[in-house]
Image: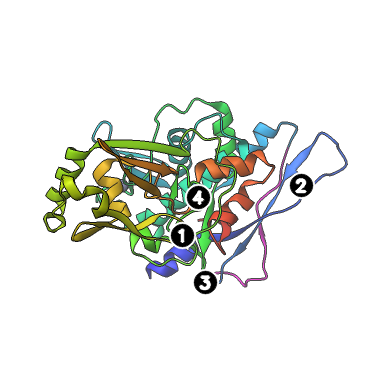
């Protein structure tokens, strides 16, 4: 039943060509909605058209688009004030976009972020068949950026509002359902396969290249740890390692990397740790690092920022800067997925 209910909420969104009717200044955005096959749905060849909206102002067209979109209510646990709040999906999406990416990002990168944010919410929303936020069961989503998504209550940036509204209702789907979205700040040139980070195999979250990130301040990083502190931290977490100062250089080696370049395994004396564990232990920007043991300290040099799975926000911005639209950005980072529109 849950599956049927969710499928009824999905309609294939087909953005049709602008319906120019001879007036150069009048642009009319039309969308044709094709229902997915569901027991109660009309035949698949029957197009259900939303009324076209004519306007001379792009902003009005965007507002009309947002108005026309299915915009259900969701429950948000606000980690900042500890309250459970109810708001519309589109209002929530704008708060996430504002919290997740700088306003200096290109238009198409912001739109891609809006669709990703909406997809995460749609995947979790109970009204759409989801399981809600696992950390705050009373809510569909929470505002803890380390759990669900970042969130900024101040959303008075008109440009961000118009860009988010331009994608109103759109979600990323695979097999007709909203995908489990992951995204991160900076991949460092190659995203990570989801199974190397979250132990789940999802065909749409495989490793893909992510060009043009080098200029980002988060592209590379460095963490230095005094030798004694490094030895103590490792021996506390891995007593079997038995690291000693006299033999430290020979005891610490990167044993294996994933295809993306991120560290899979580090040998630590008689024990080992994953790259992800090392990232957490020493607060590294990413699991793609080198280790250099010097006379006084241990130096980690990192590439990228975040877990590396799904869309790279900085990579998306680089694509946007080179003229790629948000649909192509999302199709690049989420393999073999489709954009669809939520509908009642
Ligand atoms: Zn959450």
- In the picture of the structure, the residue carrying the numbered disc 1 is 179
Residue 66 spot, x, y in % from top left? 57, 41
**Nearer to the camera, 270 or 148:** 270
Q: Which circle marks residue 18 in the picture?
A: 2
Q: Quadrant of the N terminus?
A: bottom left
193 above or below 244? below
Residue 229 spot, x, y in % from top left? 18, 38
- In the picture of the structure, the residue carrying the numbered disc 4 is 311
* Mark 2 or mark 3, earlier in chain: 2
Instruction: Write the residue at 63% across / 71% down.
Output: 44
> Mark 1 and mark 3: span between their CA atoms?
19 Å
Among the 4 quarters of the image, the one containing residue 226 = top left
Among the 4 quarters of the image, the one containing residue 2 = bottom left
Q: Which residues are magenta?
A: 40-54
Q: Main secondary structure of the magenta part?
A: loop
- Left or right? Give the position of 196 relative to 241: right
- In the picture of the structure, the residue carrying the numbered disc 3 is 38
* Mark 4 or mark 2, earlier in chain: 2
Residue 175 spot, x, y in % from top left? 51, 68
> Mark 1 and mark 4: span between their CA atoms?
13 Å
């Amino acid at each position: 039943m849950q599956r049927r209910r969710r499928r009824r909420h999905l309609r294939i969104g087909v953005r049709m060509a602008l319906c120019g009717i001879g007036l150069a200044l009048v642009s009319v955005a039309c969308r044709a909605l094709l229902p997915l096959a569901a027991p109660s749905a009309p035949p698949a060849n029957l197009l259900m058209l939303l009324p076209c909206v004519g306007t001379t102002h792009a902003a009005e067209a965007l507002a009309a688009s947002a108005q026309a979109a299915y915009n259900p209510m969701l429950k948000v646990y606000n980690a900042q004030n500890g309250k459970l709040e109810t708001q519309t999906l589109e209002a929530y999406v704008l708060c996430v976009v504002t919290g997740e990416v700088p306003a200096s990002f290109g238009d198409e990168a912001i739109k891609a972020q809006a669709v990703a944010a909406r997809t995460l919410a749609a995947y979790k929303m109970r009204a759409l068949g989801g399981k809600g936020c696992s950390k705050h069961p009373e809510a569909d989503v929470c505002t803890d950026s380390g759990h669900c998504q970042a969130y900024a209550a101040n959303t008075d940036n008109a440009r961000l509002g118009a860009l988010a509204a331009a994608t109103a209702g759109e979600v990323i789907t695979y097999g007709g359902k909203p995908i489990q979205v992951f995204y991160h700040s900076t991949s460092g040139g190659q995203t990570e396969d989801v199974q190397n980070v979250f132990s789940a195999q999802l065909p749409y979250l495989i490793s893909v290249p992510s060009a043009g990130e080098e200029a980002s301040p988060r592209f590379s990083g460095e963490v230095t740890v005094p030798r004694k502190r490094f030895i103590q931290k490792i021996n506390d977490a891995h007593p079997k390692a038995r690291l000693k100062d006299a033999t430290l250089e020979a005891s610490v080696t990167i044993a294996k990397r994933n295809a993306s370049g991120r560290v899979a395994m580090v040998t630590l004396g008689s024990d080992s740790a994953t790259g992800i564990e090392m990232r957490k232990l020493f607060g590294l920007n990413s699991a793609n690092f080198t280790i250099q043991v010097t006379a006084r300290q241990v130096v980690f040099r990192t590439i990228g920022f975040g877990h590396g799975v799904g869309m790279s926000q900085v990579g998306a911005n680089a694509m946007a800067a080179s003229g790629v639209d948000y649909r192509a950005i999302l199709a690049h980072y989420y393999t073999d997925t489709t954009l669809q529109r939520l509908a009642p």
